[in-house]
Image (spheres, rainbow, N blue to C red):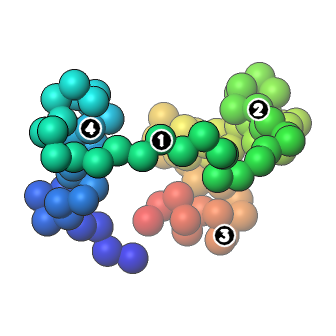
Amino acid sequence: MEHVPRERNQEANRLSQLAMAGYETLPEATMVEQVEKKAFQTNEVMSNDASEGGVGGGGDPWYQDVLDFLSTGVLPVDPPLANKIHR
């Protein structure tokens, strides 16, 4: 995967400008289609509340190991996890 700067991605740049400015600023020749149907249906809502253990629930939030490393410099005992955090 490669990051493409917004200046080199005109479509993404236009979409971000539209999202920030709104319809009023569009040139008259711009065609806008409003889609009423949702692209996907979700039945489950996952918590991102640290007190509930983040995604999946229970235990520490997903970022706790990273936060511990940044604040204390101590890596987790699990070698693959420690490698991911230390990168």
19 with respect to 40 (left or right): left
Q: Nearer the viewer, mark 3 or mark 2?
A: 2
Residue 67 lies in quadrant: top right
Query: Whole-percent x and y of residue 65?
Result: 63, 46
Q: Give the residue at mark 2.
A: 47
Q: Nearer the viewer, mark 3 or mark 1?
A: 1
Which circle marks residue 34 in the picture?
A: 1
Q: Nearer the viewer, mark 1 or mark 2?
A: 1
- The local secondary structure at tag 2 comes to loop
Which numbered disc flags the more N-terminal residue, 4 or 1? 4
Q: Does residue 74 sit above or below 18 in this rendering?
A: below
82 with respect to 26 (left or right): right
Q: Does residue 69 sit above or below 4 in this rendering?
A: above
Q: CA distance from mark 3 to mark 4?
A: 45 Å
Q: Give the residue at mark 4.
A: 18
Q: Are marks 1 and 2 in contact (CB under 8 Å)?
A: no
Residue 80 lies in quadrant: bottom right
